[in-house]
Image (spheres, helix red, strand yellow):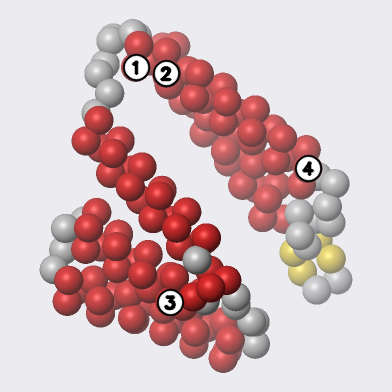
Amino acid sequence: MKARAADFWSGLALAALGAYIIFQASRWEYLGADGPGPGFFPLWYGIAMAGLSLGLMYTSLRNSDGEKINWSGASRAFGTWLALVAAVALLKVAGFFVCFAALTFFIIAVMYRRPWKVAAIAAVASSAAFYLIFPLALGVRLP
């Protein structure tokens, strides 16, 4: 029952956050003359967050079988989240491409436990793909 109660309260908190994001994004321009405006992505992100969190709340109320929390899976999720936070924090210091490559390497090598060589190739390739697409092809400057 405790795991389901945690799902319900987590869903409620995420639904409130989703509603706040929707409210804030609705104040921004949705579509402009050049295409999607600054409110486009946050609005749809908030809608998805609110919808999925309501689904989590519904399933937690419907299935109250006393399921246990999988702490090994939770620790892996928290590790990935901390790696993302570190990458964002170092973004201005190291730059987008280095941080994205390091994050990709960490997720593949540590979280998925793949060989370091595979992780390094994937990290360099994905970072190079971002460079080819955004700065070269689209002319968009990344941090």
Cα gap from disc 3 to disc 2, whole angstroms: 37 Å
Percent from the top left, x then y, of residue 135?
58, 86
Residue 107 seen from this side: yes
Query: Exactly how many numbered labels are in the figure?
Result: 4
Cα gap from disc 4 to disc 3, whole angstroms: 32 Å
C-beta proximity under 8 Å, tags 2 and 1: yes
Q: Earlier in the sequence, mark 4 or mark 3?
A: 4
Q: Tell me the mark number nearer the camera, choosing from 1 and 3.
A: 3
Q: Earlier in the sequence, mark 4 or mark 1?
A: 1
C-beta proximity under 8 Å, tags 2 and 4: no
- Snapshot quadrant of residue 108: bottom left
Q: Secondary structure at mark 2?
A: helix
- Snapshot quadrant of residue 117: bottom left
Query: In the shown orientation, is residue 111 left or right of residue 123?
Result: left
Residue bearing the label numbered 3: 98
Callout 1 amino acid: Ala
Residue bearing the label numbered 2: 6
Callout 2 amino acid: Ala
Percent from the top left, x then y, of residue 93?
53, 73
Percent from the top left, x then y, of residue 45?
61, 47
18 to 8, vertically: above or below: below
Q: Earlier in the sequence, mark 3 or mark 2?
A: 2
Checking the image for residue 24, the label placed there is: 4
Residue bearing the label numbered 1: 3
Cα gap from disc 1 to disc 3, whole angstroms: 38 Å
C-beta proximity under 8 Å, tags 1 and 3: no
Callout 3 amino acid: Val
C-beta proximity under 8 Å, tags 3 and 2: no
Point 39% across, 55% down: residue: 83
- Circle 1: is it few (<14), some (14-19), or many (20+) Cα within 10 Å? some
Cα gap from disc 4 to disc 1, whole angstroms: 31 Å
- Snapshot quadrant of residue 113: bottom left
